[in-house]
Each structure stands twice: as C-alpha cells, then as structure tokens.
Amino acid sequence: MKSKQEQKQKMLTGSPAKALFFFALPMILGNLFQQFYNMADSMIVGRYVGEDALAAVGASYSLTTVFIMIAIGGGMGASVITSQYLGAEEYGKMKTSIYTALINFLVLSLLLALLGFFLNKSILTALKTPENILESAVLYLRIYFYGLPFLFMYNILSSMFNALGRSRIPLFLLIFSSVLNVALDLYMVCVLSMGVAGVAIATVIAQGLSACISFGILLYLLRKYPAEEESVRLYDAGMLFRGTKIAIPSIVQQSIVSIGMLLVQSVVNSFGSSVLAGYSAGMRIESICIVPMIATGNAVSTFTAQNIGAKQTERVKKGYHGGIRMVAVFAVLICVVLQLFYGNIVQAFLEENAGAAAYATGSSYLKFIGWFFVLIGLKSSTDGVLRGAGDVNVYMAANLLNLGFRVLFANLMAPIVGIQAVWWAVPIGWGVNFLVSFVWYRTGRWSRKQII
C-alpha cells in the first residue's frame, strides 16, 4: 500500500488529467459494483419470481435510491473539509472532521430509518403504487430500513477513504459486498423461495458486513497520519456547522436524480404495473449509466478540495478540463451500447412471458435517454468544482432548478403525450442544471472561497 505522501502527491503534482483519471477509475468501478448489487435484486426477482415482484422492487427503488444518494451526498460534502485539511497537512483537524462526520450521519441514519420504517406504506400509497404490488413493496422497504444505518455508514466511510486519496479501498469492499449480495439473493430466492423479502434481507446483510469492515480499516489508516493528541477531538460543533453548509447542497446535488424519480413515480404508477415494471428496468440501467458521470464529478470535487487546500487554483481548472474530456468519452460509449443492445438489456430483467408493455416501455426509455448522458456528465463535473471549493449556494440552486423542471414537465405533459413526458423531463433538467453551474464557474468566484 502506497504511503499517504505518495497518495497526496498524485493529486497535487504531475498531470492533472492523469491524476484525476487514476483517482476516479476505482470510484467508477466501485460505484458500478454498488449499482450492480442493487440491480441484482431487480434482475433476480424479475427472472425467478415474476413481473409483479419486479414492479414491487421497482416501486421501492425510487425511494431507496433517495436514501442512498443522501448518504453519498452527505459523505461527499463532509469529505470536502477532510480533503482540504489533508491538502493543508493539518492532520489533527482532518481526523476531527472525520469523527464529527461519522457521528452526525450515524444519528441522522437512525432517525431516517425510524421515519422510513413507519411511514413507508403511506409514502407508497401517496405515490399511487398499484394495489396488486403494494404489500410486496411495503415488505421490501420495511426490511430495507433495518439496514439503513449500515448503508449510511458505509457510504460516509467510502467518502472518507476517497478524501484521503484511497479510492481503491471502497472498490475492493464493494466487490466483496456485491458478490456476497448476489450469492445471498440467489440462495434466498431460488433455494429458500423467500421472494421480495429474500433480496431485501440479502442487501441488509451485505451492507452490514461492509460497513463494519470499512470502519476497522479507517481506524487503522488514521494511525498513519501524525497529529498532536490534543489537536484531535471526537466532535467539533464548528466543523458540524461548516460541514452542514457543504453537505446539504451536496446531498441535494447527489440525490436530485433520485428525488426527481420519486416525485414523478406517481406519474409512472398511473400507467399500471406492466409499464412500471418496464420503467423499473430502464431506471436500473440508467443508474448504471450515470455512474461514471457522477463518480467523475465526485473525483473532481476531491481533486478540487485538495488543490484548493494547497493553494493551487490553476491546477483545479486543468483537472476540470480533464474531467470534461472523461465524461465525453463515457457518454459516447454508453450511447453506442444502448442503441445497439437496448432490447437484450431490458429482456435480462423480465421473465420470458412478461407483457409487451413492460418490454416496450423499458426499450423506449433506453433508446431515448442514451443520447443525453453527456449532460449529466457536464453537470456533475462542473458541480464538483463548486462543491470542492465550498462554493455551494449557486450549484444547490442549479440542482433545485433541475428538480423543478423535471417534475413540472413530467406532471404537466404526461396527460397530453403519455409516458414519454417522463423521458423528456430528464435531459431538460440536466441541461438547465449544467448551464447555471457553468455560468457561475466561469465567474471564477469559487476560487476565492474559504472554508478552513
């Protein structure tokens, strides 16, 4: 394992584009594995239980993804302060920022788990979840919320590893948890015939083990950073305040896609469970496709934070340009794959005798959205610079505009043009978000922001 100084120098010296790529690559692979084991729930119940089971997990997906993105966004926001202290070599404050973030998000996850456990049926009913799948969706969510604290802690810990320049560690842990989750899914569904409940239990077990292992590794790594004992505190209210100012916009930015999915879920649900099953398959594929875009943006954020801490503003701009080139390449590859293989991809989620409406809905969505992933890549990279610099107000507003345009367009146009209104709402929101963030980036005001 490389020393902390070698890890840090990769971010602060040499080619910015190269440093960003090799830092982002494990994050991309790790997030792909995370989406893979989330997607495994849908694939396994869709193939081995049936269309209604796939729709039930899909009805839950938009809500569970919001919580996943809250955890990821919170971790990214908290990691900005950690990265800047690392860049400034203030290791005592760096450790304090990590401990403060872990305590804050543990408390938050417990509160959200309680709320979700007791309110999930009300939420699903409000979203017009079809009656024939409501009880299965409620069962899946109730089990899922038991494991929510594990989900939060794992994602916060992963963000801290990334802040320290150790992006390979979350990758290895996600490979482990993904393999374990798929094995448990197959065992509980195919052998024990537990259906929707089985995939939910498998997810909780895999996330719980990963969170515990991550915590042990982090404690070991922190011993390698020298700091005066009196400079390290278990909790710092000042860091809570500064971290919250960054974390809240970061949560909004990370979860905006998922919140949009949740708020338009009632539109999709109104078309019936077969359309919902096809839409669920399409959403799962979309969640895979946006991974390199979101991960690149998160890498740009960490890169920016460390270089801002080291007073290297011009290097941040070069890293941003490298991130833009990366997402452009990813967008072309994703578009080609989806246009050529959309039918085979959707079919992987559906049983052989699934309805034509499910297949047509999933295929239509993938063919359309494949042309627009470059927009979320541009948005994520630009937001990454603003977040890493701690300049959060404008990019939070941009993400709220994204959400507003998406929800408004889908709800107003769906009664007129049908389910395709949900398709069009997505790139419109991404495009608005990028334009606002990019205009603010061009002002250069983010480079004069001070948070430590």
Image (spheres, helix red, strand yellow):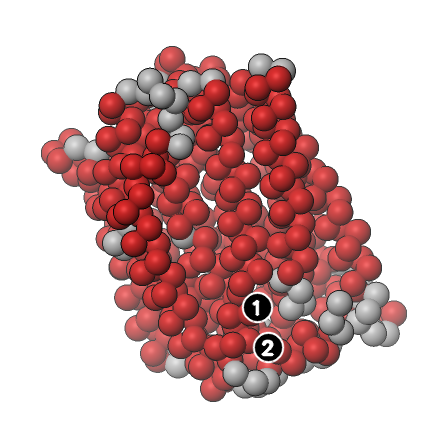
Q: Is mark 1 on a helix, strand or loop?
A: helix
Which residue has dot 1 on it? Answer: 23
Gap between marks 1 and 2 measured at Cα: 8 Å
Residue occupying image coordinates x 48% and y 77%: 17
Tell me: 434 left or right of 25: left
Q: What residue type is labelled 2?
A: Met
Tell me: 348 left or right of 100: left
Q: Nearer the viewer, residue 118 or 201?
A: 201
Q: In which quarter of the image is residue 417?
A: top left
Given contact means CB atoms under 8 Å apart, are the residues at marks 1 and 2 in contact? yes
Which residue has dot 2 on it? Answer: 11
Residue occupying image coordinates x 28% and y 47%: 340
Q: Is residue 197 above or below residue 75?
A: above
Q: Which label belongs to residue 425?
A: none
Tell me: 302 left or right of 362: right
Q: Which of 128 and 225 is in front in this view?
A: 225
Earlier in the chain: of badge 1 and badge 2, it is 2
Where in the figure is residue 279, as x and y percent of width and height?
Answer: 32, 33
Q: In which quarter of the image is residue 375?
A: bottom left
Residue occupying image coordinates x 40% and y 32%: 348
Which quadrant does the N terminus fall into? bottom right
Assess disc 1: are there few (<14), some (14-19) or many (≥20) residues with their C-alpha within 10 Å of its C-alpha.
many
Where in the figure is residue 317, as x and y percent of width and height?
Answer: 44, 81
Tell me: 216 left or right of 312: right
Q: Is mark 2 on a helix, strand or loop?
A: helix
Which quadrant does the C terminus fall into? bottom right
Q: In this view, does 449 lie above or below 26?
A: below
